[in-house]
Structure formats: structure tokens, C-alpha cells
Image (cartoon, helix red, strand yellow):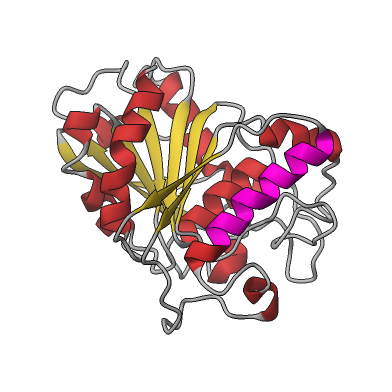
Amino acid sequence: MPDFLPLVAAAGRNDLDYAAPGLPGRQIILRSARPARWTAQTPVLFVHHGVERNGADYRDYWLPLVDDADLLVVVPEFPKANFPGSAWYNFGNRTDPQGHSNPVAQWTYGVDEAVFAGLQAEGLSRQSGYGVWGHSAGAQYVHRMISLGLRDKVRIAVSANAGTYAMPDLSVAFPFGLGGTGLADDNLRALLGFPLAVMAGTDDVHTSSPNFPRDAAAMAQGATRYARAHRYFDAAQAQAARLGVSCAWSITDVPGVSHDGKRMAAAAAPFLSTALHT
């Protein structure tokens, strides 16, 4: 097992090269923002970057927030050279190029759990669980990971400004729904009972960026990222009504914010701090 001590070696910025289990030859960079008053009791938050794979930027977005929030932030950076395209990142390497299911151990969605287990094993975290937050492509990563059941130790998850969603619908094929994943209604009930928070910048309505998903399956979810976030939440409410269960999801509009990871991080920090200290 790697030595995770460098992630907490000093207050502020720390970096560590990491070879994730199940992903031989595909190195990840772990970037951390350690609060000045860190102890092994400090809650851990995994942050997932956007399509540019700019983990250092996202770590720096959180750096001025971690002292007040009292959080150890760890950003797994997935370099494009090792994890090319949305299949490896947004969609978690759930299937091979031919569409066949990969073993769960090969999914990139398992990185948070593996790193957290390492922190626990080395006595660097005495927490029983952790939080996750992702923005843009990272928001896609987070909510699909949660939807597919990789959430045993996740206490709270936030998906902010995602471009597309795996709708909680077994009739729509993954990655735009949960069809073909082996999940059933009982899995949907458990998912709807998990505290998944959706955050949507009210000004995230611009569609000219080359990174805005505009294929037919994406456009069916709404004309803008903001609209898609609300459709995703509404779909969860509808599924909960169909299944006769209550929905633990929430949605929060962030006024005046567009597709901005830094400002969405600032909006999320107080909420996540409260959730992870409760």
C-alpha cells in the first residue's frame, strides 16, 4: 500500500503520485488542501475536477476554504494521457470499448474508496466515512458513482453543474440512465434514500462551449446544464412517487453563477462542512 502521509505533510498544498488498485499503469495524481488545524479527526472531502483534468486548479479553489470548513480536501487528478475521454472519467470505465461490462475493480469510480481506506489504514483518518463533490465532468463522475452503488462510506455527495446525467430510470441505457447496469427497483429505492445534493448555477445556461454536451441523448435532458439539473431532480421525485418512497435528494440553485468551479466550490463549502461535522 502506498504511503499517504505526504497528503497531510504540511498545511496547504500537497501532491502524491498514486497507482490505483485495478488500474495498472494508469497513474493518478492526488492533490490535497490540508487545513492548518488538521488532525486525524478532520473530515475528508474528495473533490472531482472537470473535463480539463485540472486537479491542481480545483485543489486551489478549495485551498482558501478548508480552514473555515475544517475539511481535508483530496483531489484525484485523472491525466488525459492515462484516462482518455469521457469513457474513462465521466463514465467510470464501467464498460470496455465494445460495450462489455468491466469488473468493478477496474472502474475509476473506486478511487475515492481506495484512497480513504489507505488513509484509515495509516491512521491519517479516524473518520468512518467521507464526502464527495464534483463539478462539471466531475459532477458526472460523482453522481454516476453514487448511482451505481459505490457509496458504502460516502456520507454526503454533491453534483454541481453536470453536463449530462444518468437519470434514475431503468428504461434508459447507461450513461444517460441506469438501464443495462444490472440495477433493479430495489437499487433505485436505496439510491433515492441517499443524500445526493444537486447544485445548479442559475447562469449556467450558455451552450457555445465545445465542452457542452449536445448529442441527442444529452439534449433530451434539457437545453442547458441548468435545465438538466432540474430535470434530473424532478426525475428522482417522480421515481420516488412511483416506488412509494421518500426522496432524500436535494437541489440548490446558486444565483448568478455560471459554469464556474471556483464559485460553485465556495457555495458548497458551508453545506459540506455542516454535513460532515454532524
Residue 236 lies in the magenta-colored region: yes
Residue 82 image offset from top left, x and y in percent: 49, 65
Is residue 253 shown above or below 213? above
Q: In front: 205, or 137?
A: 205
Residue 164 image offset from top left, x and y in percent: 58, 64
Q: Is residue 3 visible?
A: no
Q: In front: 30, or 271?
A: 271
Horizontal side, residue 242 vs residue 160: left or right: right
Which image quadrant for residue 45? top left
Q: Is residue 132 visible?
A: yes
Q: Quadrant of the C terminus?
A: top left
Residue 63 image offset from top left, x and y in percent: 19, 44
Which image quadrant for residue 99? bottom right
Which residues are the magenta region?
A: 228-243
Is residue 116 shown above or below 51? above
Residue 177 image offset from top left, x and y in percent: 73, 57
Horizontal side, residue 47 vs residue 19: left or right: left
Horizontal side, residue 242 vs residue 267: left or right: right
Tell me which residue sits at (42%, 84%) in the image: 208
Assign the magenta stretch its main secondary structure. helix
Horizontal side, residue 59 vs residue 209: left or right: left
Q: How many marks?
A: 0
Residue 241 lies in the magenta-colored region: yes
